[in-house]
Amino acid sequence: MVRFLVVLMGTVFIDLYTKYMVMNKMAEGQTIPVWPEVFHLTYIQNPGAAFGMLAGKTWIFIGITLAVLGAMVLGYRWISQAGVLYQWALGMVAGGALGNLVDRIRFAKVIDFLDFRIWPIFNLADTAICIGVAFILWDALGEFRATRK
């Protein structure tokens, strides 16, 4: 359980710190080429979910996030008995969800800034959620393979 909490808190801290830096060092809409035509830092405020879907439906996202985090709290015994990879993965998902939840509550939008030019702009919370889900799928695939042998 300690691993889960450390990863969760680290993810939230890094996410909120990077968003704070972007908000305080950049103007909304400003873009800074890090690797021209490949990767830019571009400050936007996203009122929706991934790709701007369901813009302005903040309360839906807050409700879903609280439900997911509530399920994790209720499953704390299971999380504490899960393997290391699974605890890291769930910590990343919960930390990313919590980081974006803070934005939604404070601004009714999510601060995004990672711009790879071929993909919608996103943030570190989104990255943590995606990596966490990938780890969960990887772990589940390993479990599936182990039970088939």
Image (cartoon, grey):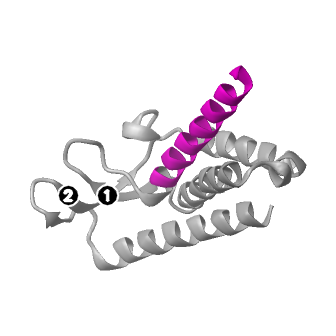
Can residue 117 be seen at all in this image of the molecule?
A: yes
**Residue drawn 31% across the image and 50% down it:** 121
**Residue drawn 65% across the image and 69% down it:** 9
As drawn, the residue found furthest toward the left would be 36
**Left or right placement of residue 13 versus residue 51 in this view:** right
**What kind of element bears circle 1?**
strand
Residue 116, placed above or below residue 113: above
Dot 1 amino acid type: Leu
Name the image quarter holding residue 1: bottom right
**Left or right placement of residue 119 versus residue 125 in this view:** left
Residue 73, placed above or below residue 16: above
Q: Name the residue under label 2.
A: 39
Residue 20 at x, y percent in the picture:
44, 74
| Residue 38 part of the magenta segment | no
Dot 2 amino acid type: Phe
| Residue 133 part of the magenta segment | yes
Q: Over which residues does the magenta segment extend?
A: 127-149
**Residue drawn 10% across the image and 54% down it:** 37
Looking at the rendered structure, which numbered label has been put on residue 114? Answer: 1
